[in-house]
Image: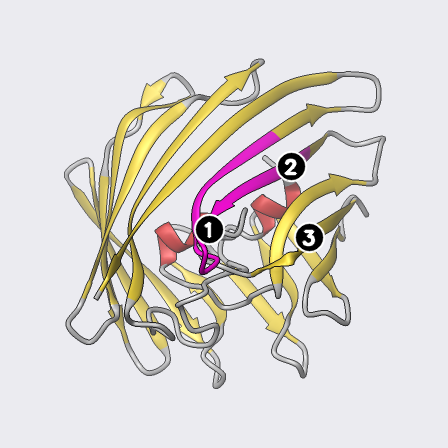
Amino acid sequence: MNKLVASLLTVAAIGSFFSCKKAGNSSNPQFRVTHAHDSLITYGTGNYPYVKDYKITYTDAEKLSTIKEVNTEYYYGGFNMDSSLRSFNFGSNNIIIDIQQSGTVSRDSASLNAAGQLFLLLGNDFAEYSYNSNFQLQASQDILGTYNYIWDNNGNISSLINESTLDTQMVSYYTDKADAFGNYPCTDQFYFYGMLPVRTRNLIKSLVSTQSSYYFTNSYIDYTTDAQGHILSEVIKSYTGSLSQITDSTYRQVNFDYEVK
């Protein structure tokens, strides 16, 4: 897994029609995503292929209601993963997520700060986040480690530093393409927590490691958009390995459906 992807498992850097401060709010209620079709083809031994769909519903108040994940082909460690249903309840300073999967029910709780940004996640996962005076993500800590985020003057994350390994991920952007829902890799966590607490100004083009002595993953992203800039599909090509050898590669494609309301 790409280090930036891993560190952003509970933060997302996108959401053209979602508020960057309050998850589930809509800055353009006339246009919202209702379905995502996600497929991954792998070459090598370090990843598992999958085909899955996310079906998204909203309340009459335009807030996120449910996300149903349907796994038609999803094998993790050789086991087929069951589908799940996540229901979201937005409070003034938190989000309660009830999860139904494999006949069981569990709950996650996301606490928000005064600016409406995620700062603590409890439940199936644990994570903490801190922000600078410009409301930009400054640091995150989860089971994968502690990460520091460096921002440029254009409102984009320029690099991500792993405090444990000192590995740095450099992030490049399509400077002619504005941020939109689907901006990789940030949308992935929306499916789990309905949360988009931090945004970049532009669409991410690539994530490349500068630490050659550690195991790394480099990713390159191509987008197809409509005339308004909404992402219709994206292709992510990733390569994992070390300085001497590329051990795995993946080809991932995600297609998005929207509704006008």
Amino acid type, mark 1: Gly
Nearest the camera: 30 or 183?
Answer: 30
The span shown in magenta is 218-237
Give the side of residue 89 with respect to residue 178, left or right. left
> Residue 36 at x, y = what percent?
33, 43
Give the side of residue 182 with respect to residue 62, left or right. right
**Mark 1 highlights which residue?**
182
Secondary element at image label 1:
loop
- Tell me which label, 3 or 2, sits earlier in the chain: 3
**Mark 3 highlights which residue?**
173
Where, quadrant-wise, is the N terminus in this rendering? top right
Amino acid type, mark 2: Tyr
> Residue 92 at x, y = what percent?
32, 83
Q: Residues within 10 Å of mark 3 (few under 14, many from 20)?
A: many
Q: Residues within 10 Å of mark 2 (few under 14, many from 20)?
A: some
Nearest the camera: 98 or 242?
Answer: 242
Amino acid type, mark 3: Tyr
How many marks do you count on the picture? 3
- Tell me which label, 1 or 2, sits earlier in the chain: 1
- At x 62%, y 60%, the residue is 202
